[in-house]
Amino acid sequence: MGREIIRGVKASVSSRPRCRWVAPALLPVINLALALLLSAVVVVLIGESPTRALWLLANGAVGNAEAVGYTLYYATNFVFTGLAVAVAFHGGLFNIGAEGQAYIGGLGVALLCLGAGGWPTAMIVAAAVVLAAAGGAAWAFVPAWLQARRGSHVVITTIMFNFIASALMTHLLVNVLIKPGQQSPETREFDPNTWLPQLHDVARSLGWEIGRSPLNLSVLVALAAGVGVWIYLWHTRWGYELRALGHNETAAVYGGILPARTVIVAMSSSGALAGLMSLNEVMGVQHRLLLNFPGGAGYVGIAVALMGRNHPLGIGLAAVLFGALYQGGSELSFDMPNLTRDMVVVIQGLIILVCGALEHALRGPLEAVVR
Amino acid sequence: MRNPTTLVVAVLVAAVTVPAGHVVAQEFVPAIVFDMGGKFDKSFNEAAYAGAERFKKETAIAYREFEVTNEAQREQALRNMARRGSQVVVGIGFSQASGMERVAREFPNLKFAIVDAVVDLPNVQSIVFKEHEGSFLVGMAAAMASKTGKIGFVGGMDIPLIRRFALGYEEGAKYVNAKIEIYRNMTGTTPAAWNDPTRGGELARSQFDRGADVIYAAAGATGLGVLQAAKDKGRLAIGVDSNQNHIHPGSVLTSMIKRVDLAVYEAFKAARDGTWKAGVRSLGVAEGGVGFSLDQHNRGLITAEMEKRLQQARADIVAGKIKVTDYMAGK
Amino acid sequence: MSETALLIALLAAATARGAAPLVLAALGGLFAERSGIVDIGLEGKMLAAAFGAAATAAVTGSAWAGLGAGVAASVLVSLVHGFACITHNGNQVVSGMALNITLSGLTAALGYAWFHEGGQTPLLGPGARFAPIELPGAAALAGVPGVGTAYREVVSGHNLLVYFAAAIVPVAAWIVYRTRFGLRLRAVGESPDAVDTAGISVSVTRYRALVMSGVLCGVSGAYLSIAHHASFIRDMSAGKGYLALAALIFGQWRPVPTLGACLLFAFADALQARLQGTPLPLLGVVPVQLIQAIPYILTVCLLAGFVGRAVAPRAIGIPYLKER
């Protein structure tokens, strides 16, 4: 199914307007405005002021250094999962399993941090990157292998592996890794030298005061992952093979590409990227392994990848948009209790709908105007 | 601001010096952060909400509130409340413990309270309940009401808190009938486990099919499916946390009530009155923190004989003659 | 012996109840996907229908009015999906995900605003929901060993929507394989160009498929809120839409194998409920999480072991752009 979806994306991309830059540049802005307008209608129906809501949303997301920090912290998660989904997509595979892959990646990170109390931080960080990626890749490898060798549809197997991951992790956290004597199924807090430094601490040591937020050095890993994915997909032979396979399997096989190996490599890389998300949550913020820490970021990654057109740059932008919606949304429900958390979810959904799925709706009228 | 004159003066001063619309820094605004289930879960969080509402009604003091929707928001919400000048911040649910630990350290001059977990800091009040004691009593009720000698338990997720409910329930049932058969099911391993009445209903049906005729649900909104299945099958269910007898009068045998409302109300009130104290408050049967509910909706289900034995057991627990095992104690 | 028979009968009955919403949603998805539209929004449609049905049944006191409203809500969501994906060539997965997210919030928000019970709807009384139906002869046959038990426990005693789900499978198969609409549906999903050349509108066929999907998901959602349970609870679909999608793919986009996949999922779930806390031969009492993972592990094993490569409709996911 994924393969066909990606072709669908390309089909819509290839029908670019003749007007070179105006529409592509204006369209997202107009779409976002339309989405906000729709949301405003909902806000009015609830009986609140839409301008105040919008101001609170925007201010809550980017109004001060701390808000920006939170927005980027959420965005870091979405960059990882978005890249994960995108890499698989380029190979024509629909990876719904980023959630479970991130969960298992977190297991690798947690085991390291629990055991490596005495190591130097730099060494722990390097090892954590490897283990997070390895955990995620391992969890993606089985569905990948089954797809490649047995033709088992990767959508089903990755959904199933999400459930299996949650069962496994609940078992481990409740029965094995739990800190004795506490209610909450989570590990003990890691030793401070295993924490990924948070940006406000780094900034302070350099003499700057920035707002306190969970944003941590994993954001740099996310940027590096974005660049890495870009190089991998468009500047390596493996990336070429992957895209060729995603574009047209028959032609790819004819061209000497081994589909099975390519599928396994693509899915494992995808899982590794998803696993890296745990660096942010487990090592950068919570400093312990807790139940359900991915919190749905794996699913948001699907929307992020598609809205970002499966390109690292687009994914970065889409991830920041979603991060802003998460952060601004929670600030919004603080100040306007009538706009419950459900309303914030509605607004997020409408923005994805209009900016993502209905993105072409206004292209015709817009082109007619700018031409 | 215990003294009314001070209050009046403070209000007057505030009214004069602060332009309308601005938040008055000295104003007493308690805050509450609900857990994932949300304040209308008809159960745990709703009890907390009821306590906050009671405070608002009695004192005409509004409170700030927030419903958490993802893991990262917990700490953020607590900090946000603290920063906005809430003098007392109450966190509902054990999942808030780690977030509260950090935020309470950052704001040593503010008061915090947490329900269902212990945070060992000088400015945190930890309120824990002896759910096993209350569960023991409803387990007794279940065993006495059961005609088949088989009863059931449906939990949300297999976590220590729910095991504590289950263990107390089983001990209570066996106290009445040593040979009673008890089925135990857990709903799932994802957060949906607390929000899946369809599966809750199916688990209950499965236990009813095996002969159980009373089922205790400790599973959030999933438990509503258990209650419904009991009604549909003409058997009995036991509610949890809030008094759920009214949901299906005549088929809810009783509810294991956990006075989260009282905990929240008292934390707010003590903070306002200046009688607030840090430390652990452990609320069991003796403190009136847990118990079984008896009202007009289940009056017909609990016979005088049953009530007598339950009251006796309650007194025995208070007196220490009955010792209910706390699942957490051995850990 | 009779104990074992009863156990099997009860498991079968639980399987039927568990499979009903999956079958309805999966067959709905089948129509959409056979026409070439990815339908990841099954979850959102089920939620919309569950809410619409429960809210209407609560206000009117009529189960049928509730069912109608649930179906209408679900069809409306389906049409929005069509508007984005067919009329405007939007990305089908994004649209489906967006609708899932929107409805997860919207149902709870509307419930909150209308009923003031925190996103839930009021509990429904007997007339406002589909109650179990005792089929004629269930009591009379009860004395007959084997057959009587099977008839009483498995065949009789379900609510109307379970029987509807059972009946819809052959109907769906007949529509897909034996009617002109079915032929067009499959053709549009395989090679829309050819259908277009033959003078049949690709868009209209796909819209019709989405309406079918909406109707079936509507019944599925109504099953959750006004048949199995008696109110709407936020996010009460609890991932069943995704499971239905998995069943559809497992069933290779064909009605009868899809039914098989749904029955398998439901059976595994009923089995795990029964196995929890029961000592297993050789293993003793297994951690409950492992038992809970059985349905998912079983699915993966069966998929890998017995089911061949899944072949999707060829044009699935591709917006149809008319040659100009």
Image (cartoon, helix red, strand yellow):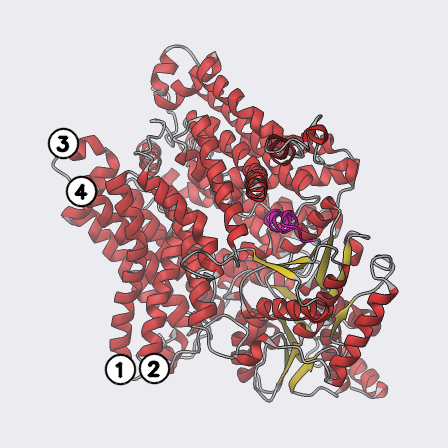
Asked if disc 3 and disc 2 are in contact, CB closer than 8 Å, the reply is no
Question: SS class of the residue under badge 3?
Answer: helix
Going from the N terminus, do you reach mark 1 or mark 2 first?
A: 1
Query: Mark 1 highlights which residue?
Result: A120
- Magenta region's main secondary structure? helix
In the image, the segment drawn in magenta is B198-212
Asked if disc 1 and disc 2 are in contact, CB closer than 8 Å, the reply is yes
Q: Which residue is drawn at 46% across and 17% down?
A: C182
Question: SS class of the residue under badge 1?
Answer: loop
Query: Mark 2 highlights which residue?
Result: A193
Q: What percent of the width, then of the height, locates residue B184?
A: 59, 59
Query: Mark 4 highlights which residue?
Result: A241
The relative height of residue A187 versus residue B107 in the rendered view (above or below) is above
Sort mark 1 into few (<14), some (14-19) or many (20+) by Cα contacts within 10 Å: few
Tags 4 and 2 both on a single chain: yes
Q: Which chain carries label 3?
A: A
Alpha carbon of mark 3 to alpha carbon of mark 4: how far? 12 Å
Residue type for callout 2:
Asn
Q: Is residue B157 shown to the viewer in this render?
A: yes
Residue with the most extreme top position: C198
Q: Which mark is residue A254?
A: 3
Residue type for callout 3:
Tyr
